[in-house]
Amino acid sequence: MALARLIVIEGPDRGREFDITIRGGGIGRGEDTAAQLTDPSVSRLHCSLEPRDGALWVVDAGSRNKTLVNGAPIAEHRLEPGDEITVGQTRLAYLPAGSVAVTRAGAPAKVTIEIGTRELMALPGLGDGGARRHLATLAALGERLTKAIGRGRTDVAQAAVEACVALVGADRAFIVTRDRDGAATLARTGDVQTSLAVPDQVIDSVLGRGRALAVEVGGRLVMAVPVGDAVLLADRATGSFGELELMAAGCLGQLVAAALAAADTQGLLTRGQAALEERLGDGELIGRSAAARALFELVSRVAPTDATVLLGGESGAGKEMVARAIHRGSRRAAGPCVAVNCAALTETLIESELFGHEKGAFTGATDKKIGRFEAADKGTLFLDEIGEMPLTLQTKLLRVLEERRFERVGGTRPVAVDVRLIAATNRDLPDMVRRGAFREDLYYRLSVIHAVVPSLRERADDIPLLAEHFLARMRQQVGRRVRGIRPDAMAALVAHPWPGNVRELRNAIERAVVLGRSEWIEEGDLPPHLATRAAARRSAPTPPLGSMAIAAPPGPAVSVPALPIPPTSSPSLAVPPLGSPPTIEPRIEAPAAPPAAARSLRDLEREGIVRALAATGGNKAQAAAILEIDRSTLYKKLKEYGIG
């Protein structure tokens, strides 16, 4: 009995299907595999399918070209319906028995009937056209409600009253809800200059019995239809409402009731998600990689204290998110967390911005101003780009940290504050100290706890998770239906070096959601430099393991220097000695290369590994991808050559 089916949707075997039994089996070119492929880029046993705990897992067999699931390389992965497995140049869709998956496999479907709102209006055999109009109006309403649900209850109600006027030929329509003070109008349309008086027993009857009514009130014809916990009212001055119109309005009420309930649920989920993201530091501080876990552990250890923290790391890596996470985990969480970008303020303004000023302190100081230190009292002050602070102000900052009091610009009275300080920089502060550009005593005062926020290159395993997170957020903000990210687009995201780090990834997803045309993010929706790089990567020849070729974006040729390689161990809380680089990890220097004539294949292979690690900032997953070897092979080579 087949447990699942694999359908080849891309590659030399496109269209073939393989049944996978409860015993599982392999995928590859070997004759003993459950899914034997002819693709020459596939290993004899590329990966295997293993039943575990009622699910099917795909496990990479150490293949050179790796196994990908939904565009991301895996060691093992629990399969879900519709997952796409890529081996070599072949992509297969996973379809469990008894399930449905939407794939691009097989021959194109032959269309036998296609119908939309326009065709409904012209459909024969529906009498005088009233039924056609009703069907068309309800179909159009369904389309509109799908979009309105995400915008909330009011938009759903407004779509309903406008559709009702068209559906039954009413002069106007309302949706009302009962409350202790009578009735509250949720939406209205049509002639709303005059009021509509409806006996409360009509509303109570409709809500109590759940049946639509047509009544005459004050010489006007009124239709009352149940819509969940609300009532749809429509009226007109002449004519009558027939059974067909009342039935059509009843169908409309059922549609709208479901949409209102969905809008309410969506609102609850949105508020719950917002609250969760608030607790997670705006949702940016997420990840499963070793680097991310080490960072989270550091945050959990540092947050409960009042120690001053200095955060290093590249621009866009998420230093402010780490600072906010520390604040939320501290005893000051109920207080303010105030952020100041020192690089965004001129030397003449930054002192007033931080410490405030008295009225008349300088030209233009027409009122007293509270500074950021006072605003952060009983909370946390985050000073970003601390390396850009002028030397003259560094002296005052040091004094404030020591004394916990200061004077406003132009003032004489000391102002006491209770503030925890977190600072961040992407500059080399010890080097700035040596050059006299940063105060040595302030550096040590800030570095009570010193940590480096890892770049996105160092946590490449988190890219799919972060991309899906940003997609969920942008989908909500933009109000556009986007089901997910195509495997080719995800592969391009994972392969990109992300010099702009998390901020660049967030911007790339935002661009794709805003400019994309389909329900999926395609590779072409990504910023041009990502798509170009991905295309170049696919067309580039594969270098041998010992070669010196390092993948790089299009542009002039560059040499890759022997850069220091940070290891993946957990960060230390020790303050680095002055004169050392501003990092908390030990570094490995690439050895000097001997003359080419004297170098063996072993030397070339070792140097190729060292250069790949240097080019990726020590990220072993990306280094293995550059070298076109499996990560387990890379670890064996690292041990063999004594690297890291």
Image (cartoon, rainbow, N blue to C red):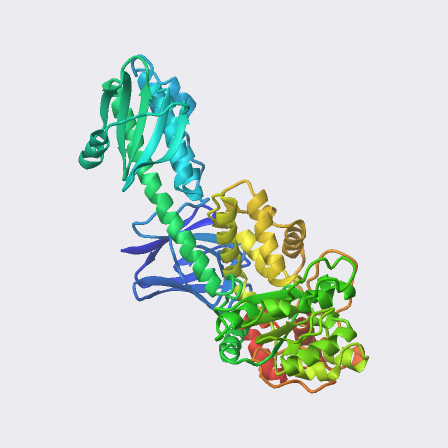
Q: Does residue 586 lie above or below 464 as drawn?
A: below
Q: Is residue 99 visible?
A: yes
The residue depicted at 30 percent of the width and 63 percent of the height is 54
What is the count of numbered marks?
A: 0
Q: Does residue 338 lie above or below 251 as drawn?
A: below
Q: Position of residue 252 (x, y in %)?
A: 31, 30
Q: In the depicted view, which residue is nearer to us: 406 or 191?
A: 406
Q: Quadrant of the C terminus?
A: bottom right
Q: Does residue 626 lie above or below 144 as drawn?
A: below
The residue depicted at 65 percent of the width and 70 percent of the height is 383
Q: Position of residue 88 (x, y in %)?
A: 53, 58
Task: Write down the quadrant of residue 110 in the picture.
Answer: top left
Left or right of 150: which side holds 627? Answer: right
Left or right of 550: which side holds 241? Answer: left
Q: In the depicted view, which residue is nearer to us: 404 or 76?
A: 404
Q: In the depicted view, which residue is nearer to us: 21 or 184?
A: 184
Q: Position of residue 27 (x, y in %)?
A: 44, 60
Q: Does residue 479 lie above or below 302 as drawn?
A: above
Q: Position of residue 334 (x, y in %)?
A: 48, 69
Q: Is residue 6 visible?
A: no
Q: In the depicted view, which residue is nearer to us: 580 or 239?
A: 239
Q: Quadrant of the N terminus?
A: bottom left
